[in-house]
Image (tube, rainbow, N blue to C red):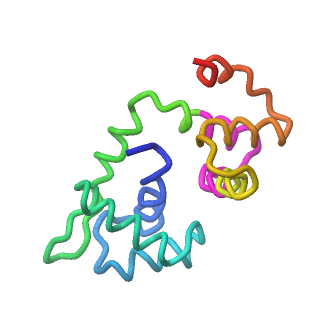
Amino acid sequence: MGLGKYRPLLEAVKLKGDEVFQSKSELVGILTFKLGIMGVSEAKQLISEAIEEGVVEETSEGLIVHTDLIEEEEGKRDVFGEMVEYIAKQLGVTELEVLEEVKKLRERYGNLDNKILAYIYGLEKGIDMDRFKDELEG
């Protein structure tokens, strides 16, 4: 599980102000229409994977997003996540916007590692990315 993978679920929880969603449809709706960060099929796939990995739990109350598990995973050193956060701060945009731009670069450059794509995106935007150079070479 990587930093970027379940970040949208944290954004959905923030937007709703609660970790419990009445249904998959509600969570899909927030991810796709209110936040506008992914398509319907992507949101459904993310939720399915989150359920499989125990990040989202299906209960009689609805879907419970275990934000503690997502945040704990993010606590581990994740160079890609650090890059996304750094780029977002430098540009004054959200991390989700940076993730979307990295996704667009994937369409242009093909199946490169996310760290390389983030590095390229940062350089294209005129950001000094030297602090991540060693991690990419290593």
Residue 96: % across, % down: 60, 55
Our reading of the magenta stretch's main secondary structure is helix
Q: Residue at x 50, y 48 (%)?
A: 4
Task: List x then y, in percent, for residue 75.
Answer: 39, 33
Find residue 80 and report its horizontal and vertical position in percent.
56, 36
The quadrant holding residue 82 is: top right
> What residue is at 56 percent from the left and 69 percent from the top?
38
Viewer-proximal residue among 42 and 108: 108
Outermost residue toward the left in this view: 60
- Residue projecting furthest to the front: 110
Is residue 59 rendered to the left or right of residue 7? Answer: left
Q: Does the magenta stretch include residue 52?
A: no
| Quadrant that contains the N terminus | top left
Residue at screen point 49% across, 70% down:
42
112 displayed left or right of 44 = right
Which residues fall within the magenta stretch?
83-100
Q: Residue at x 28, y 69 (%)?
A: 20
**Residue nearer the viewer, 103 or 93:** 103
**Residue 67: x, y in percent?**
32, 52
17 shown above or below 134: below
Q: Nearer the viewer, residue 8 or 134?
A: 134
Q: Is residue 18 above or below residue 135?
A: below
Q: Is residue 104 left or right of residue 81?
A: right
Question: Relative to 53, is 38 on the left or the right?
Answer: right
Q: In which quarter of the image is residue 24?
A: bottom left
Quadrant holding the C terminus: top right
Quarter-of-image position of residue 86: top right
Q: How many labels does the image show?
A: 0
